[in-house]
């Protein structure tokens, strides 16, 4: 995941008096930090027996999208079947083993 961080900083530079009336100076600047990769390294998974690297914080649904799999699929995560309703909320972790069965019609 890539992320751009930005923010505004307001700094009070000091108070100076002139003929008894206090003057307060403010400096406002926009701070833009360079783009940085939030994850330090990709996760390593085994998908259908093949090693894969995917971005950190990827869900099962995200993996399926990356692989271009649409339609009904069955997913097993670390020898446990994950219901389709849980694909979006099931986060993958480094060294997970994923088996995906994609149903194909034919005759």
Image (cartoon, rainbow, N blue to C red):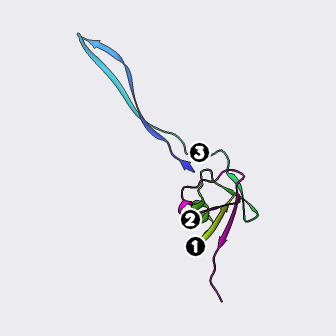
Residue 7 image offset from top left, x and y in percent? 44, 38
The answer for how far apart the CA atoms under marks 1 and 2 are is 9 Å
Residue 24 image offset from top left, x and y in percent? 31, 20
The answer for how far apart the CA atoms under marks 3 and 2 are is 28 Å
What kind of element bears circle 1?
loop
Residue 104 sits in quarter? bottom right
Whether residue 23 is situated above or below residue 52 in the rendered picture: above
1 or 82: nearer the viewer = 82
Query: What span is in magenta?
Result: 78-107
Residue 46 image offset from top left, x and y in percent? 73, 59
Is residue 14 one of those drawn in magenta?
Answer: no
What kind of element bears circle 3?
loop
Q: Is residue 30 left or right of residue 1?
A: left
The answer for how far apart the CA atoms under marks 1 and 3 are is 32 Å
Residue 72 image offset from top left, x and y in percent? 58, 73
Q: Earlier in the sequence, mark 3 or mark 2?
A: 3
Q: Across the whole image, how many numbered discs are drawn on residues? A: 3
Residue carrying label 2: 84
28 or 58: nearer the viewer = 58
Q: Earlier in the sequence, mark 1 or mark 2?
A: 1
Instruction: Please rate how many residues cluster around mark 2, counting C-alpha atoms within 10 Å: few if below 14, some from 14 to 19, many from 20.
Output: few
Q: Residue sitting at 57 percent across and 51 percent down?
A: 1
Q: Where does the C terminus fall, quadrant-wise?
A: bottom right
What kind of element bears circle 2?
helix
Residue carrying label 1: 72
Instruction: Please rate how many residues cluster around mark 3, counting C-alpha atoms within 10 Å: few if below 14, some from 14 to 19, many from 20.
Output: few
Instruction: Please rate how many residues cluster around mark 1, counting C-alpha atoms within 10 Å: few if below 14, some from 14 to 19, many from 20.
Output: few
Residue carrying label 3: 38
Circles 1 and 2, Cβ within 8 Å, touching? The answer is yes
Q: Earlier in the sequence, mark 1 or mark 3?
A: 3
Circles 3 and 2, Cβ within 8 Å, touching? The answer is no
């Amino acid at each position: 995941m890539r992320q751009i961080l930005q923010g505004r900083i307001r700094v009070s530079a000091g108070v100076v008096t002139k003929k008894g009336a206090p003057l307060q100076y403010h400096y406002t600047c926009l701070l833009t930090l360079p783009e940085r990769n939030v994850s330090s390294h990709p996760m390593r998974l085994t998908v259908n027996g093949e090693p894969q690297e995917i971005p950190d914080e990827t869900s099962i649904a995200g993996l399926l999208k990356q692989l271009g799999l649409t339609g009904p699929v069955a997913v097993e995560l670390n020898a446990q079947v994950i219901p389709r309703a849980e694909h979006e909320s099931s986060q993958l972790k480094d060294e997970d083993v994923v088996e995906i069965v994609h149903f194909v019609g034919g005759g």
